[in-house]
Amino acid sequence: MNKLINALNKYASKYMNTRIVFMLDMLMSVMASLIAVLLVKLFISIDMLNTEPAFVWLGSSFLVSFLLIYVFKTYRIIIRHMSLKDLSMFGLLAFTKTLIVGFVYAVLYGCSNEFNILIVCDFFLTFGAFFAMRILMLTAYDYVKGLMEERKKCQNILVYGVGVKSVSIIHR
């Protein structure tokens, strides 16, 4: 544990790499779309989403997510200082993504009741995934920062003794 804290100590004052956050946002967006497709396929209609429409939904979700995350630059939001305005950017991103992917799907395969449920599920899952990921990152950052602050308060004390292992260092 001490090695981990010491390794993370040099990154304590720095921000997380934006490429990592970009990839995490992409992963969350595509996984939310995948879960939405699976939920509709399992609980609503088995025939509605064959292999091709599901791949069209997921592929367009990947491309649209890539473009929108890059355009909205949500990966550059400082996690420590996230506000309601930043949260609304995630909502706008999820709404725009769902709207564009839904439009592409509707043009290719038409609209149905299952399609409407898929759009609603995809929006809420995408927004929830973005929100949950940011809360998780904020919590992890605060935890690691707290560990490092506690580590800085420790004093090293040299203890002399009479045995074979007579010199040792205690962290207090």
Image (cartoon, grey):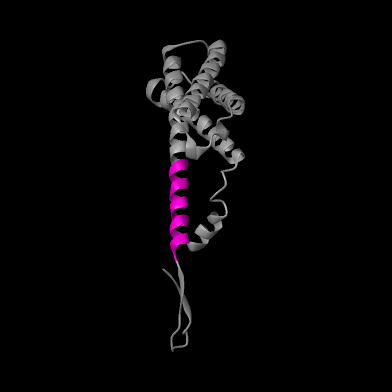
> Residue at 45% of width from left, 26% of height from top?
36
- Residue 47 in view here: no
Position of the C terminus, as image quadrant, is bottom left
- Residue 14 in view here: yes
Residue 148: within the magenta?
A: yes
> In the image, residue 87 lies at what x, y percent?
46, 28
Please state which of residues 104 and 84 is positioned toward the viewer in this rendering: 84
Please state which of residues 139 and 123 is positioned toward the viewer in this rendering: 139
> In the image, residue 1 lies at what x, y percent?
47, 61
> Residue at 47% of width from left, 56% of height from top?
148
Left or right: 28 as drawn, with respect to 114: right
Q: Quadrant of residue 116?
A: top left
Residue 93: within the magenta?
A: no
Please state which of residues 2 and 171 is positioned toward the viewer in this rendering: 171
Residue situated furthest left in the rendering: 43
Left or right: 8 as drawn, with respect to 120: right
Left or right: 65 as drawn, with respect to 114: right
Left or right: 160 as drawn, with respect to 56: left
> In the image, residue 33 lies at what x, y percent?
49, 27
Label tally:
0
Classify 53 as above or below 20.
above
> In the image, residue 6 lies at what x, y percent?
53, 60
> Residue at 43% of width from left, 44% of height from top?
139
What is the span of residues highlighted in magenta in the rendered image? Answer: 137-154
Q: Quadrant of residue 107?
A: top right
Q: Magenta residues: mostly which secondary structure? A: helix
